[in-house]
Image (cartoon, helix red, strand yellow):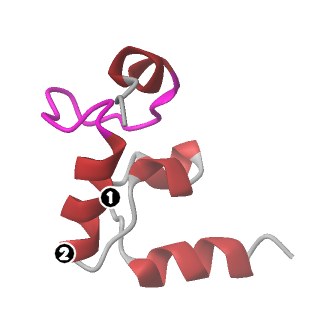
Amino acid sequence: MECKIERNRKICTCSYEGCERNGICCDCIAYHRNRRELPACYFTPDVEATYDRSIERFIAMYQKKD
């Protein structure tokens, strides 16, 4: 399957400058999964900016949305 890196980079919400996985979603997901985290695209912009990509932070973020 062909990776759509340039298209992915245009919609990537990660604010970490210089990330080598930017636009390579499969690498990004694998990296964060190994760290028990989720990638930036799962978080709201204000939470993503904290770089806390933990599963616990994700759950807390969505519990507050009620």
Residue at 35% across, 44% down: 25
Q: At which x and y percent is residue 4?
A: 40, 24
| Most common secondary structure along the magenta stretch | loop
Left or right relative to 49: residue 62: right
Q: Is residue 62 above or below residue 25?
A: below
- Magenta includes 61? no
Give the position of the N terminus as an image quadrant: top left
Q: At which x and y percent is residue 31?
A: 19, 61
Q: Is residue 55 above or below residue 12?
A: below
Identify the residue under disc 1: 29
State the residue in front, 6 or 51: 6
Q: At which x and y percent is residue 9?
A: 39, 22
Identify the residue under disc 2: 34
As drawn, the residue found furthest toward the front would be 1
As drawn, the residue found furthest toward the right would be 66
Q: Secondary structure at mark 1?
A: helix
**Label 2 CA crowd tier, 10 Å (few <14, some 14–19, many 20+):** few
Q: Secondary structure at mark 2?
A: helix
Q: Which tag, 2 or 1, sits closer to the chain's start?
A: 1
Left or right relative to 1: residue 27: left
Q: CA distance from mark 2 to mark 1?
A: 9 Å
State the residue in front, 13 or 61: 13
Residue at 52% across, 26% down: 11
Q: Amino acid at mark 1?
A: Ile
Q: Is residue 40 above or below residue 3?
A: below
Residue at 69% across, 73% down: 62
Is label 2 in contact with label 1 (beta carbons under 8 Å)?
no
- Magenta includes 12? yes
Residue extent of the magenta highlight: 11-24
Q: Amino acid at mark 2?
A: Asn
